[in-house]
Amino acid sequence: MKKIVALNLKMNLGYEEALEYVNTIKDKISDTYEVIFFPSAIFLHLFKKSGYQIGSQNVHYENKGAFTGEISPYQLKTSGIDYTIVGHSERRLYFKEDDKLINKKVIGALKNNLKVILCVGETDEERRLKKTALVISNQIERALKNIDSFDLRDVIIAYEPVWAIGSGKTPSKEEIADAIKFIKKIIFQRYDINIRVLYGGSVNKDNIKTIMNIENVDGILVGSSSFNPNYLISMIDIID
């Protein structure tokens, strides 16, 4: 199975920039990896023309209804979108999304046959208090409540320590390996299934090769290093 390179463009590109981005990346990234772009919702249709897999940065839990400004799993799936991110730390922090809401989003996405990248990770304070394992375990348990092992086949977990996102700081190889091993262990113990786990948080040219070669790492979730398409292409070339 190919390793995953998931690229979260967040709220950046304007229309002309998005067009240029798509034209720049087309046929330029190796098919050695399963490449998934997560552009702003308004540009999902543009990125579908890139030839790569496309996902949404966010999703509502209902298929239809009076939820102004939201995008539903039904709308995504019927538009040819196959992936969505759920539980990103920026959604948790800025939009006050808690584990209960995240669980509803995961269930709604899976009911519509969307694949979910579920983000989990500890804050700097939780890390200092040596609560990483407890925090991750609780986030996973609550986010996956009432989800069976069959549906879990469409869930990928991204370990993104909150303190590493956009900070330029990354955990040590040992910390990443331990966290991902722990996630896989608790999933197997609870569901008797092996699941893919990604690492995310300040991935760049200097560390991408090291991170991708860590045992049990099934890929990466990249944020700011994906904003410039030429930088992105050169970064992925390092691991090709």
Image (cartoon, helix red, strand yellow):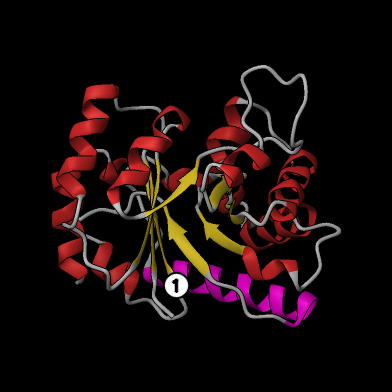
* Residue drawn at point x = 59 percent, y = 44 percent: 78
The amino acid on which the numbered mark 1 sits, given as a three-letter code, is Asp
Q: Which of 211 and 229 is in front in this view?
A: 229
Residue nearest the observer in this picture, 49 or 154:
49
Residue 206 found in image quarter: bottom left
Which SS does the magenta portion mostly show? Answer: helix
Name the side, left or right, on which 6 lies relative to 110: left
Q: Quadrant of the N terminus?
A: bottom left
> As drawn, which residue projects farthest toward the right?
146
In the image: residue 236, left or right of residue 85: left
What residue is drawn where x is 28% and y is 23%?
Answer: 15
Q: Mark 1 points at which residue?
A: 218
Q: Residue at image x 53%, y 53%?
A: 82
How crowded is the residue under tag 1: few (<14 C-alpha within 10 Å), some, or many (20+)? Answer: many
**Where is residue 59 shown, x and y percent of the image?**
62, 38
**Magenta-tinted stretch:** 173-192
Judging depth in this view, the residue of 190 and 50 nearest the camera is 50
| 236 inside magenta stretch | no
Please say if 182 is above or below 21.
below
**Is the residue 189 above or below the residue 30 in the image?**
below
